[in-house]
Image (cartoon, helix red, strand yellow):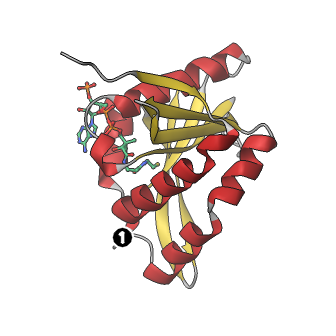
Amino acid sequence: MVEALITVRPARLEDASEIAATHDTSWRDAYRGVIPGRELERMISRRGAEWWRSAIRRGSRLLVLDFDESVGGYVSYGRNRMPSLPYGGEIFELYLAPEFQGVGFGRKLFDAARRDLAGHGLRSTLVWALADNERAISFYRRLGGDVVRRAPERFGDELRDRVAFGFE
Ligand SMILES: CC(C)(COP(=O)(O)OP(=O)(O)OC[C@H]1O[C@@H](n2cnc3c(N)ncnc32)[C@H](O)[C@@H]1OP(=O)(O)O)[C@@H](O)C(=O)NCCC(=O)NCCS
């Protein structure tokens, strides 16, 4: 039997187009009907390959799921951006292309990001999800996160609730 080679590794410049494609399909899949359509298109169109190339060049913390030399998902993370919440690190984005969901890769990316944060002294972690993104909410609950804050987020003229999960 031939087994696929699956690794989690730091993103490289040559991954930029595949990360952009993963971002596009994953965001459409997760947010269609959740984020107003025009705003969603605007958010996706801003994140082309050049945007990702520049993020990688800047040294942003970004890991990819490498599945037989194709990018199946990514996680980006860094310092918690909301100092009023007592968490050192934050997972900014965690997205898998639909065909890679539901088989443990989300947990794999999440754990890898947390390990890297802890290695930089950031042991507790915060992550935000839209309250209507039921898959993400169930996932973060299952991983042991506690809801520590709710806050509205503006998308054009409309507001949506987002929820912060804390991981000690
Ligand atoms: C949310 C997401 C990252 C989860 O990754 P995943 O690979 O599908 O999840 P995993 O297979 O690693 O699941 C990890 C655990 O969560 C549980 N879980 C995952 N999705 C679940 C769901 N919809 N309902 C209940 N439990 C769920 C799994 O059963 C598993 O539990 P176990 O390890 O105890 O068996 C992924 O589905 C995704 O990319 N979704 C679209 C984008 C998105 O919403 N990202 C988050 C934005 S904040």
State which quadrant residue 100 falls in.
Answer: top left
Q: Residues within 10 Å of mark 1 (few under 14, many from 20)?
A: few
State the image coordinates of residue 38 (x, y, percent, origin top left).
50, 83
Q: Residue at x 41, y 59 (%)?
A: 25
Q: Residue at x 39, y 37 (%)?
A: 140
Q: Residue at x 40, y 30 (%)?
A: 68
Q: Is residue 14 left or right of residue 100?
A: right
Quadrant (top left, top right, bottom left, bottom right) of the C terminus: top right
State the image coordinates of residue 137 (x, y, percent, origin top left).
36, 46
Kindly tell me whether residue 28 is visible in this rendering: yes
Front residue of 85 and 54: 54
Q: Is residue 78 left or right of residue 131?
A: right
Front residue of 161 and 115: 115
The verdict on label 1 being within 8 Å of ligand 1 is no
Quadrant (top left, top right, bottom left, bottom right) of the N terminus: top left
Q: How many marks?
A: 1
Q: Quadrant of ligand 1?
A: top left
Q: Amino acid at mark 1?
A: Arg
Kindly tell me whether residue 87 is visible in this rendering: no
State the image coordinates of residue 74 (x, y, percent, origin top left).
51, 40
Q: Residue at x 41, y 55 (%)?
A: 26
State which quadrant residue 57 falls in.
Answer: top right
Q: Name the residue at the front extreme.
A: 2
State the image coordinates of residue 117 (x, y, percent, origin top left).
65, 23
Classify mark 1: helix, strand or loop.
Answer: loop
Front residue of 35 and 48: 48
State which quadrant residue 13 falls in.
Answer: top right
Residue that mark 1 sits on? 32
